[in-house]
Amino acid sequence: MKNIKHILAISSLAMGMALPMSSIAQTMMMDESKMGMSQSASMTDGEVRKVDRETGKITIKHGDIKHLDMPGMTMVFTAKDKRLLANLKPGDKVKFMVVNEGGKMRVTDIQPAP
């Protein structure tokens, strides 16, 4: 009888550990699907407010950045490559791609808006 109680106790502990793990796995799969969404991100419309080529920073008034679930606002971004800022000046209408790299918003592509 003692052996049966031990087996039941161990089984219930194992089940208690397995169930939360399956929900963690589901959560991780959902997060991976969100990551896939950001891979298919689109360009965002914006207007250049300030360019600092020395530091590689650009201030852009932008519309919603849908792939990052960010509303429109004016903010400072860092260019992934300073050369992206070479021909930009305040007032330019642009389309740009931004990614979140460890909490830092980096412009990876920027082009004149048609």
Image (cartoon, rainbow, N blue to C red):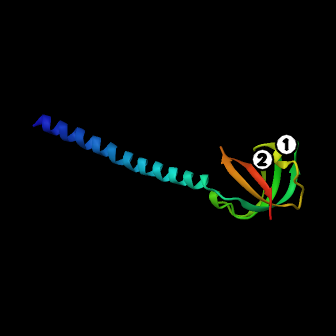
Relative to 52, residue 6 above or below: above
| Quarter assignment of residue 71 | bottom right
Q: Nearer the viewer, residue 20 or 5?
A: 20
Residue sitting at 51 percent across and 51 percent down? 31
Question: Mark 2 sits on what residue?
Answer: 78
Q: Position of residue 55 (x, y in %)?
A: 85, 42
| Quarter assignment of residue 94 | bottom right
Question: Mark 1 sits on what residue?
Answer: 55
Q: Position of residue 33 (x, y in %)?
A: 51, 53
| Kind of residue sitting beneath label 1 | Thr
Relative to 60, residue 100 above or below: above
Q: CA distance from mark 2 to mark 1?
A: 8 Å
Q: Position of residue 40 (x, y in %)?
A: 61, 55
Q: Nearer the viewer, residue 34 or 11?
A: 34
Is 16 left or right of 38, judged from the image as shown?
Answer: left
Disc nearer the start of the sequence (2/1): 1
Residue sitting at 82 percent across and 54 percent down? 59
Is 71 left or right of 39, judged from the image as shown?
Answer: right
| Kind of residue sitting beneath label 2 | Thr
